[in-house]
Amino acid sequence: MNYSTVPPAKCGPTRKILYTLVQLTLVLGVAVPLALGGIALLLREIPQLTALLFPGPEAFVHWYFYAEILALSFVLFFGVLLLAFLVMITLPRLMAYAVRPDRVYPLYGIHYFLHQTVALLTNSITFTMLLGDSSAIPHYLRAVGYKLRPLVQTGNNFGMLIKHESPYLTRIGTGTVVADDLSIVNAEYSHASFVCRRPRSARAVSSATGSPTRRRAGSGTTACSAPRS
């Protein structure tokens, strides 16, 4: 009996080899040079960092050195967070338009690459640890792409461990509360293909009076897409 819910697609060895070569090119030809160039630029443009490379305790005897390093760390940390957030809410959204839900794509192609890139850019442990278990996390998830309208603010809608494959296919019911460790499965895979689908997650249930009641998803919850018959 075949339990696969994803139809097959053409995925030969040539596609796998080319996909691997593209990944190596991006890492060795783009990511590594940018990281090394960024470090060299910081050392050249920031004299406080350059002073640490020379022998002697001169850089550590003045109080203003520590004040400058503290201010610089503050600007770099929140500047990088702001830049990462802007990239997170813009670039993956454009990439996701190329990967349509309920459509089968072969693995190791351009659509697979875009799908994996969306998951990489929109899953941030830094932001979820920073904003989780607070009233700010639903607004962050809405900015990333979650569909949470109408939002009922409970003060603790989501925990600090949330991951997904595509935030744009995720719809959470009104009044839902997730304790922690939520993994949303937006895609199904076979040995040669994949398909993105909207998962079925916890939904608000109306009581006899018509007011929404809260459903709580406990720790370790996984929202899965329902297989089609």
Image: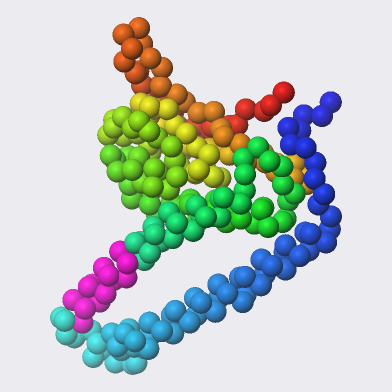
Q: How was the colour assigned to the protein in this rendering?
A: rainbow
**Furthest-top residue in this view:** 208
Residue 62 found in image quarter: bottom left
In this rendering, the answer to whether 74 lies above or below 159 is: below
**Residue at the spot x=41%, y=32% of the render?**
178
Residue under the point 78% across and 63% down:
17
Choose between 132 and 115: the one closer to the eye: 115
Relative to 156, is 229 on the left or the right?
right
Marks counted in the figure total 0
Residue, far left: 63
Q: Is residue 187 visible?
A: no
Q: Residue at x 77, y 59 (%)?
A: 16
Res 179 → quadrant = top left
In front: 161, or 91?
91
Q: Is residue 43 left or right of residue 171?
A: left
Instruction: Pinpoint residue 143: horizontal percent, then vertical percent.
Output: 38, 47
Place of residue 112 in the rendered image (x, y in percent of width and height, measured from the top left): 67, 53
**Residue segment shown in magenta:** 65-79
Q: Main secondary structure of the magenta part?
A: helix
Q: Position of residue 1 (x, y in %)?
A: 84, 26
Q: Position of residue 50 (x, y in %)?
A: 34, 88
Residue 224, compared with residue 37, is above or below; it is: above
Q: Quadrant of the C terminus?
A: top right
**Quarter of the rendering containing residue 205:** top left
Q: Is there any visible trace of residue 89 in the rendered image?
A: yes
Tell whether position 11 is magenta: no
Q: Is residue 25 left or right of residue 166?
A: right
User: In the image, is residue 69 part of the stretch drawn in magenta?
Assistant: yes
The residue under the point 36% across, 11% down is 207
Q: On screen, 21 above or below 152?
A: below
